[in-house]
Image: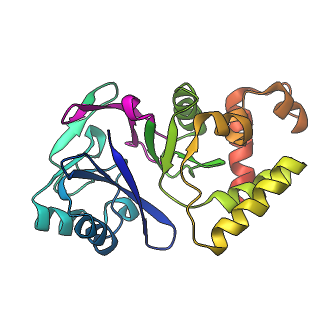
């Protein structure tokens, strides 16, 4: 069984140090060296792998120094082979990556970037979604299209309800405020107050679950007749509805 440690980095990024009972570890999306290294040293862990969900610097910024110190291997998408420096192992959609006897399914989830992947550990009930799926939100479309991102979200939405979501940023309060601008009710108001308390104590809102995102994440509901009716888009496609919501959020 994996122990997953949340490591805040930069202003609002999260890296995740994951280790087994023998203190062997991998890290997902190390934005910077110091906080990740501090976590590894304080838990006496041996870093063997770096897993990158995509090539953006705020997800790979610690790669070089960590590889230099721990002689670990960098794992990422085959589509990012020329965009993640010193990458060692290339993975594609549907392939598996193994950490001892723990298996991750690789899921291609383009939209934020064209080479974005998620790592889904079924046995651990955990998925690392980078900047594709956030708590109550989704990533901006820097390289992909609305159709790409909607299809990627549908892949993640199809995972078991109890799957825990470990995403790349602490954007939850901002996402909740956007949600309130579209749909305002007591549940959302209570969620915002709860998130404000977490922010005051610098407590992560991570992880969420697929079930929770199905209930509240507007982007997951782009295929909902109720949401389309609310947005006056009842005759529009799911992709058009998603694109409209993403544009609203971009300008929120």
Q: In which quarter of the view is residue 197 placed?
A: bottom right
Coordinates of residue 107 in the picture (x, y in percent): 39, 32
Coordinates of residue 203 in the picture (x, y in percent): 57, 66
Number of numbered discs present? 0
| 39 sits left or right of 208 in the view | left
Q: Which of the two residues, 102 or 94, is positioned nearer the viewer here?
A: 102
99 lies above or below 7 = above
Q: Is residue 46 magenta?
A: no
Q: Is residue 98 magenta?
A: yes
Coordinates of residue 248 in the picture (x, y in percent): 75, 52
**Colour approach in the figure:** rainbow
Which residue corresponds to the image point at 32% horizontal and 38% vertical from the top-left? 1
The C terminus, quarter of image = bottom right
Q: Which of the two residues, 36 or 218, is positioned nearer the viewer here?
A: 36
Which residue corresponds to the image point at 72% horizontal and 33% vertical from the top-left? 222
| Residue bounds of the magenta highlight | 97-125
Coordinates of residue 177 in the picture (x, y in percent): 77, 59
**Farthest residue toward the front?**
21
Q: Which of the two residues, 144 or 4, is positioned nearer the viewer here?
A: 4
Q: In which quarter of the view is residue 35 placed?
A: bottom left
Residue 184 seen: no
Which residue corresponds to the image point at 40% horizontal and 29% vertical from the top-left? 122
Q: In which quarter of the view is residue 123 placed?
A: top left
Residue 145 seen: yes
170 lies above or below 210 = below
Q: Which of the two residues, 119 or 117, is positioned nearer the viewer here?
A: 119
């Amino acid at each position: 069984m994996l122990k997953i440690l949340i490591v805040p980095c930069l202003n609002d990024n999260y890296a995740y140090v994951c280790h087994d009972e023998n203190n062997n570890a991998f890290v997902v999306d190390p934005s910077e060296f110091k906080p990740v290294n501090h976590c590894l040293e304080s838990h006496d862990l041996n870093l063997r792998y770096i897993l990158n969900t995509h090539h953006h610097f705020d997800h790979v910024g610690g790669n070089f120094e960590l590889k230099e110190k721990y002689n670990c291997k960098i794992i990422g998408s085959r589509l990012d082979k020329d965009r993640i420096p010193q990458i060692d192992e290339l993975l594609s959609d549907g392939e598996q990556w193994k950490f001892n006897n723990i298996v991750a399914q690789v899921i291609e989830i383009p939209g934020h970037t064209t080479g974005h992947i998620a790592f889904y550990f079924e046995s651990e009930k955990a998925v690392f979604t980078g900047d594709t799926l956030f708590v109550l939100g989704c990533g901006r479309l820097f390289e992909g299209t609305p159709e790409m991102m909607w299809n990627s979200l549908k892949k993640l939405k199809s995972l078991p309800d109890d799957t825990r979501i470990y995403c790349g940023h602490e954007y939850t309060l901002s996402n909740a405020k956007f949600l309130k601008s579209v749909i305002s009710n007591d549940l959302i108001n209570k969620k915002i107050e709860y998130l404000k308390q977490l922010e005051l104590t610098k407590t992560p809102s991570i992880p969420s679950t697929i079930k929770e995102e199905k209930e509240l994440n507007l982007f997951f509901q782009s295929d909902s007749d109720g949401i389309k009716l609310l947005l006056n888009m009842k005759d529009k496609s799911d992709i058009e509805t998603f694109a409209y919501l993403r544009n609203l959020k971009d300008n929120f």
